[in-house]
Amino acid sequence: MKKIGISLAVLSMFAFTACKDKTKDVDKEDEMMEETNMDMEDSMNEEEDIKVITIALEARSDSKANGKVTFEEKDGMVSMTANIEGLQPGTHAIHIHEKADCSAADGTSAGGHWNPTFEDHGKWGDAKGYHKGDIGNFEADDTGNGEISMQTDEWCLGCGDSKKDLMGKSVIVHQGADDFTSQPSGAAGARVSCGGIIQ
């Protein structure tokens, strides 16, 4: 009888220990599931905080210049990358203009430089002043391809701030270089490519 009693006690201990281990495993699984869900929520929130708009640039002023511009906003910063082809080799200006209207054959329907702070035209970041649309110059290679990138916290995508919001504006590529001095637009020549910043 004593042997049977001891055996039952040992079996009970094993069963209790096994149950405790299973409970620990379930708790660990629950913790892992919670962590995974939290990670997924965090990554979704991160994705929600990123805005991306890509626009097409179309040829104007009897040129063949075309391409695309991508704007990405994350953590209060807007990055812009423009890729253009069909240009004459050399230096070209690129600006943000005040209207997303590229309907005119010469691109003049896009209006003047976007200048919500009413500054003089100048080089981006110049202490004397510059337009919010004064991006600057870039080089087109021998095959007519060019690229320019920049990043700033002075722009936003759809934030509603009239001094920062790019929506409803346009990107204009010019035939020549911006001299950063001539008013009101840097004497950059004809508008050879245009794309409205719209969703």
Image (spheres, rainbow, N blue to C red):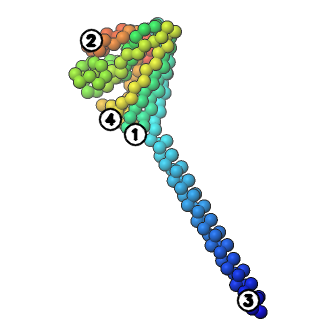
Q: Which residue is mark 3?
A: 5
In the image, farthest residue toward the bottom: 1
- Counting from the top left corner in percent of width and height, residue 13 is at 67, 79
CA–CA distance between discs 3 and 2? Answer: 103 Å
> Badge 3: how crowded within 10 Å, few (<14), some, or many (20+)?
few
Disc nearest the viewer among 2 and 4: 2
The mark that comes first in sequence, 1 or 4, is: 1
Disc nearest the viewer among 3 and 2: 3
Q: Amino acid at mark 1?
A: Asp
Q: Amino acid at mark 2?
A: Ser
CA–CA distance between discs 2 and 4? Answer: 28 Å
The mark that comes first in sequence, 2 or 1, is: 1
Residue 171 seen by the camera: yes
Disc nearest the viewer among 1 and 4: 1
Callout 3–callout 2 Cβ contact below 8 Å: no
Q: Which residue is mark 2?
A: 182
Residue at (37% x, 37% y) in the render: 76
Q: Amino acid at mark 4?
A: Asp
Q: Which residue is mark 4?
A: 161
Q: Amino acid at mark 3?
A: Gly
Picture disc at residue 195: none
